[in-house]
Amino acid sequence: MTGVAIVHSHLFEAVLQLADDHLILGHRVSEWCGHAPMLEEDLGLANMALDLLGQSRALYAYAAEIEDAGRSEDDLAFLRVERQYQNCLLVERPNGDFAHSILRQLYFAAFMHPFWHHVAANSSDETLRGIAGKAEKEMAYHLRHSAEWVVRLGDGTDESAKRVKEAVDALHHYTDELFQGSSAMTACAENGVLPDVETLRPSWTSTIADVFAHGQLAMPEVAHPQTGGRMGEHGEEMGHILHELQYMQRTYPNLQW
Amino acid sequence: MYSQGLIGADSQTEETQEFLDAFQARIDAEEKIEPNDPMPEGYRRTLVRMIGQHAHSEIVGMLPEGNWITRAPTLRRKIALIAKVQDEGGHGLYLYSAAETLGVSREQMTEELLSGKAKYSSIFNYPTPTWADIGAIGWLVDGAAIMNQIPLCRCSFGPYARAMIRVCKEESFHQRQGYEIMMQLAHGSKAQKDMAQDALNRWWWPSLMMFGPHDADSEHGDQSMAWKIKRFTNDELRQKFIDATVPQAEFIGLTMPDPDLKWNEESGHYDHGSIDWDEFWRVVKGGGRMNRDRIAARRKAWDDGAWVREAAVVHAEKQATRKVAAE
Ligand SMILES: [Fe+2]
Ligand SMILES: [Fe+2]
Ligand SMILES: [Fe+2]
């Protein structure tokens, strides 16, 4: 491969990884639609699913353009196998109860908001700056909305406090992976296209610490961070997500919908 | 999504003739009745029931289409579907608020839905086994909803009329989106075309039933018409829907599942075969394929969410107490 081709393939991989995070989390959040604890949350969760899936669509479309191999946004979103999806493990975790889902949203948004902010302000890639400008505003809402809920639940009833603590126990060890740059991400950071994810850690940690303080939650010690999604090493749920997500495209190949 | 020809309206009222005449004069002058205006108890009850049924229909209506969100075939379709289901939730919220202006809380209305006391549109008691059902619902069910709701934009009760103006804009967008799904399928592979025709076969008759029983069998049409809550009869609206929809099916090469359907030169309308009212009443009374599942899903969401709603209330109380303590 030539130097230009390598840069190109790193950009493709990094954009695809971002797209996968947004698609899989959007899929999870969309599972709530019609089943939320109150009508306002049916609307709020649907809103967040729409933002995430809209971002994934823009990213897949850009990845398809970079690849320039005749694959469409839908080919990339729907027609790969488990090991080819590079989303982090956090986003594929099952919805669990509302505390799990809203905490998962907080963890992700506390990472993506500064991520997109950095891209919008600093990226050398014009398309990504455009995507980031919109996504940054959307993630600000996700962050605010999920943070407010985590505080309400943590500082609500005994039951809600217990449930949100259980969610922290169940999910916190997946957060380290957010800061694990793949080789593609690292290369893009070196080129000034994307931020070095490790530099976002202090901001993420202080956001979470602040929310947890208001919600009377303790920052847990994580003995064994769980990672692997970036290398396509997913949990057992991933195949079930794809089984649903890909159902139509697999059952009726090569058709227009 | 829609207000069915109202099931079980109650227009009994006990006011003096003088009061009723004065109210009727306002109605006849096309004045809008606002929540704090004096109104006959029967008028209020009819509206509570009607708006409540409509709100419940929007909410229960999220379920059959929600069934396809995680399996929608493309990102574009997935996003459009979520946005549609979200719109229906928004309609529900808007309508619950309109009903609340008449003094009935959302909690109360929800309990009545879950207990089976309040009805919702029977159309949502049919299942959505295939992707084409998403097209058929948008095209036919939202299409029928629009026919029902456009006249409601002129309903005598102000908050309902205003809600309907906004809702109708979105419903007509849903209808076009559904028709576009059907068109894509009808112009697609044999499997896609078959899927579209099958969905049309299953949804056509239930869509016609959405307008409610024939006028001759309808118990409470007259008073609702006099109060200008309703503006057209069930049969008039059904005929408008048929006349508008049959050419749309022909245009995309699908066949209505009614051998008796034919254009009547003399009347300027389509004649249609007879509607199976036994099926309609069976589904209204709880015997549809999905009645139990729909209520069970709503009950599960409500029960599972109880601790969340409670936490929000308790947190708000704690905050208020702290604020007072700090002052
Ligand atoms: Fe609606
Ligand atoms: Fe409606
Ligand atoms: Fe609709």
Image (tube, coloured by chain):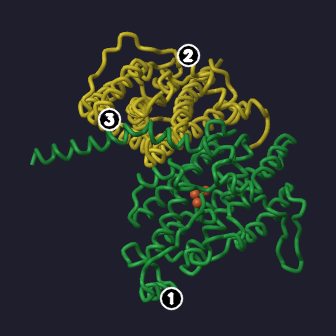
Chain colours: A yellow, B green
Can residue B313 be seen? yes
Q: Secondary structure at mark 2?
A: helix
Distance between the alpha carbons at the discs numbered 1 and 3: 52 Å
> Which percent across, then down, holds residue B177?
68, 54
Distance between the alpha carbons at the discs numbered 2 and 1: 72 Å
Query: Which residue bears the numbered disc 3?
Result: A153
In screen coordinates, is A171 left or right of B76? Answer: left
Q: Secondary structure at mark 3?
A: helix
List the single residue furthest toward the top: A223
For residue B29, the mark is: 1
Q: Chain of mark 2?
A: A
> Which percent across, then down, holds residue B139?
71, 56
Residue placed most toward the observer, B5 or B79: B5
Query: Which residue bears the numbered disc 2?
Result: A231
Q: Amino acid at mark 1?
A: Ala
Q: Secondary structure at mark 1?
A: loop
Q: Quadrant of residue A6?
A: top right
Distance between the alpha carbons at the discs numbered 3 and 2: 34 Å
